[in-house]
Image (cartoon, grey):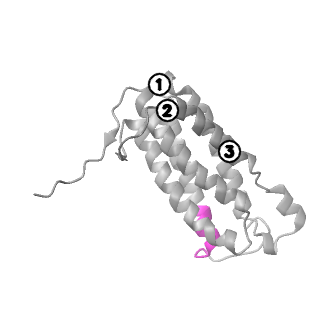
């Protein structure tokens, strides 16, 4: 860990760090797909920023608050303004999207699919960080960021589908006869 302590690979820290790393990889894949069209240039910028913030999340997780020196903790503080930035991006995209009237399934083109994968991995990452926050080892600001990030990826997937002219895949309930 960043504080010099050793932990088992099965520890909650490494579970959360592995999930965060996997999430960052999927964010990179989504960024790659978004780079294929100029219509998604704004998402490219947002995803680049998100990848850097995910490295910050990893640094924060790798520095358990209860066993780290104060100077190390200050170095990896995670500011709540990062979640606020996500909220602003979500609101901006929401203004350009039609109202959601049905559940949608993951789909809507390559970029949207990659963003949906990132959304679901974000949810798992969030679940792996919850216990660290409850134990006082990580800040609520990281949890809030991950929660807002999954909402961002959902909105970004919808936005990517619409911007690239792909149809959103609407859920159809099975009809019982």
- Quarter of the picture holding the C terminus: bottom left
Main secondary structure found in the magenta portion: helix
Q: Is residue 171 above or below residue 34?
A: below
| Residue found at x 37% / y 41% | 101
Quadrant where the N terminus lies?
bottom right
Q: Give the mark, 1 or 3, whose residue is nearer the N terminus.
A: 1
For marks 1 and 2, give the CA distance: 6 Å
Residue 65 picture location, percent across and down: 79, 69
* Number of numbered discs: 3
- Which residue in the protein does label 3 denote? 52
What is the C-alpha distance between the residues marked 1 and 3?
22 Å
Q: Specify the segment rendered in magenta.
A: 9-18
Q: Which mark is residue 37?
A: 1
Residue lying at 54% horizontally and 48% vertically, measured from the top left:
151
Name the residue carrying label 2.
Answer: 34
Compare marks 2 and 3 and give the one earlier in the sequence.
2
Front in this rendered view, residue 9 or 91: 91
Q: Position of residue 2 (x, y in %)?
A: 76, 64
């Amino acid at each position: 860990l960043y504080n010099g302590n050793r932990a088992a690979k099965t520890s909650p820290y490494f579970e959360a760090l592995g999930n965060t790393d996997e999430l960052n990889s999927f964010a990179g894949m989504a960024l790659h797909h978004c780079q294929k069209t100029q219509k998604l240039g704004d998402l490219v910028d947002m995803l680049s920023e998100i990848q850097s913030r995910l490295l910050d999340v990893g640094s924060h997780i790798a520095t358990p608050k209860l066993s780290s020196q104060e100077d190390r903790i200050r170095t990896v503080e995670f500011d709540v303004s990062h979640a606020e930035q996500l909220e602003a991006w979500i609101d901006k995209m929401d203004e350009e999207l039609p109202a959601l009237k049905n559940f949608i399934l993951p789909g809507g083109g390559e970029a949207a699919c990659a963003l949906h994968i990132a959304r679901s991995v974000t949810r798992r990452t969030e679940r792996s960080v919850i216990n660290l926050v409850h134990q006082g080892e990580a800040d609520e600001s990281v949890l809030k960021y991950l929660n807002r990030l999954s909402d961002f990826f959902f909105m970004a997937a919808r936005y990517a589908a619409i911007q690239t002219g792909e149809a959103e895949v609407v859920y159809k309930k099975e009809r019982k006869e």
